[in-house]
Image: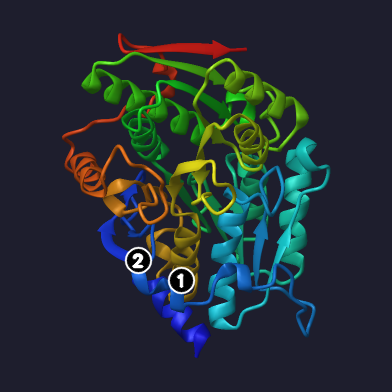
């Protein structure tokens, strides 16, 4: 009964709104970013085992991880949660695959993981992270009967067995930056993953800058922001990253946006030691540290449940071969109002700003090549 309830609730999270498809294929309906209030009655992804034993040794739904750890409390884990929730609710076998060589994984390593999944009976393979692109194109061309869900990805010409799902991270980044300054913080930091090559992290960061600058201008204050990709190439926690964040806090930084998987742990540790604040990323990270004031979230788990539903209900053609971009209009990005610790910005004000973004009254630039300071925000890019 719980499995049925979990599936019903997951499907309830899917709003009948057109996704911003980037191809001529039919637009798909988009998932919601947050579950309804009744979600607490559903099975939690944390209650579902990461590993299961299939009676026949075959695993129907597969997940190929991005770099970093599976249990990163962020991107990988949020994506895998969607796999577990859908498979558990439908009685399907599932398995995760981590490409060989960890943070140094190559395209061949990623392809080998996808091939292993297909050879083990996968009917659908969910691949996390833009770095999967080359390997995924090769695997999809070889295993034409397998459907691939490319999270933080795109579509490929002639490969209708790939569904690309991306997010408008600049929107929730903007909301987080605006909220942080409204909270009274004017000395900010951004620690990003992927070494500045990850489009999603770049959009998060650029949105954060724009939102902070907008709030600063509105309030008549000046904001200083340290902006760094150092020690984040592997999206992992490290002593070096913690030392960097610790130095920032000691020098007066009040809040840091930790934008990159397990990097969060290093920044949160530094914040705890210095009475600093942290902005989480991808999922609600308030449960990981009491230093978190809010998180820039995107609907990772919900979008995977949505895509897997289409893989099994006969409507795959709506998303296969299509690049679907999900944002505020699709209720796929935002801040977790139920758990934030903000006191300088109300839920009503947040909801109005979200609506203004949806209505086009607030336009947020997604071209992160335009990253720069403003009259109200001094940007210190640290290389």
The nearer-to-camera label among 2 and 1 is 2
Left or right of 188 in this view: 146: right
**From mark 2 to mark 1, how far is it between C-alphas?**
10 Å
Left or right of 20 in this view: 137: right
How far from the left and from the top, in percent, is residue 53?
77, 78
Whether residue 153 appears in this view of the structure is no
Colour mapping used in the image: rainbow
Instruction: For label 2, count other residues whose C-alpha is less than 10 Å away and answer few (under 14), some (14-19) or many (20+).
Output: many
Q: Nearer the viewer, residue 310 or 232?
A: 232
Numbered disc 1: secondary structure: helix
Left or right of 201 in this view: 30: left
**Residue depicted at x 44% and y 83%:** 5
Instruction: For label 1, count other residues whose C-alpha is less than 10 Å away and answer few (under 14), some (14-19) or many (20+).
Output: some
How far from the left and from the top, in percent, is residue 209?
40, 23
Q: How many marks?
A: 2
Task: Name the quadrant of the C terminus.
Answer: top right
**Residue depicted at x 54% and y 46%:** 290
Residue 28 image-quadrant placement = bottom left
How far from the left and from the top, in percent, is residue 120?
76, 69
Q: Which mark is residue 14?
A: 2
Are the two marked residues, 2 and 1, in contact with CB atoms closer than 8 angstroms?
Answer: yes
Left or right of 186 in this view: 191: right
Q: Nearer the viewer, residue 206 or 279?
A: 279
Dot 1 corresponds to which residue?
309
Whether residue 225 appears in this view of the structure is yes
**Residue depicted at x 41% and y 46%:** 341
How far from the left and from the top, in percent, is residue 100?
82, 47
Q: Nearer the viewer, residue 242 or 331?
A: 242
For this orientation, the residue located farthest to the right is: 101
């Amino acid at each position: 009964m719980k499995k049925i309830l979990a599936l019903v609730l997951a499907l309830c999270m899917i709003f009948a709104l057109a996704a911003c498809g980037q191809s001529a294929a039919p637009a798909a309906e988009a998932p919601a970013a947050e579950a309804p209030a009744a979600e607490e009655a559903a099975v939690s992804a944390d209650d579902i085992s990461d590993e299961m034993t299939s009676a026949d040794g075959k695993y129907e739904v597969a997940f190929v991880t991005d770099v970093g750890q599976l249990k990163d409390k962020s991107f990988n884990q949020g994506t895998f949660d969607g796999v577990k929730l859908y498979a558990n609710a439908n009685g399907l076998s599932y398995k995760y695959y981590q490409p060989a060589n960890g943070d140094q994984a190559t395209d061949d390593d990623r392809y080998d993981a996808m091939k292993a999944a297909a050879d083990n009976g996968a009917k659908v393979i969910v691949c996390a992270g833009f770095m999967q692109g080359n390997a995924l194109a090769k695997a999809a061309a070889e295993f034409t009967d397998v459907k691939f869900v490319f999270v933080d990805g795109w579509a490929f010409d002639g490969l209708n067995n790939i569904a690309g799902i991306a997010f408008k991270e600049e929107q929730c980044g903007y909301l987080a930056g605006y909220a942080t300054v409204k909270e009274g913080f004017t000395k900010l930091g951004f620690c990003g993953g992927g070494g500045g090559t990850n489009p999603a992290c770049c959009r998060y960061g650029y949105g954060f800058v724009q939102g902070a600058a907008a709030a600063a201008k509105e309030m008549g204050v000046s904001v200083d922001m340290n902006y760094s990709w150092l020690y984040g190439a592997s999206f992992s926690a490290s002593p070096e990253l913690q030392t960097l964040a610790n130095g920032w806090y000691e020098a007066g930084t009040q809040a840091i946006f930790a934008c990159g998987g397990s990097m969060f742990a290093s920044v949160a540790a530094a914040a705890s030691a210095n009475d600093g604040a942290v902005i989480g990323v991808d999922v609600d990270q308030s449960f990981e540290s009491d230093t978190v004031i809010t998180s820039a979230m995107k609907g990772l788990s919900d979008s995977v449940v949505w895509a897997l539903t289409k893989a099994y209900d006969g409507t795959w053609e709506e998303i296969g071969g299509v690049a679907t971009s999900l944002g505020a209009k699709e209720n796929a990005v935002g801040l977790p109002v139920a758990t934030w610790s903000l006191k300088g910005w109300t839920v009503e004000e947040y909801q109005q700003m979200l609506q203004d973004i949806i209505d086009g009254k607030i336009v947020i630039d997604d071209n992160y090549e335009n990253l720069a300071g403003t009259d109200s925000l001094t940007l210190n890019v640290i290389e």
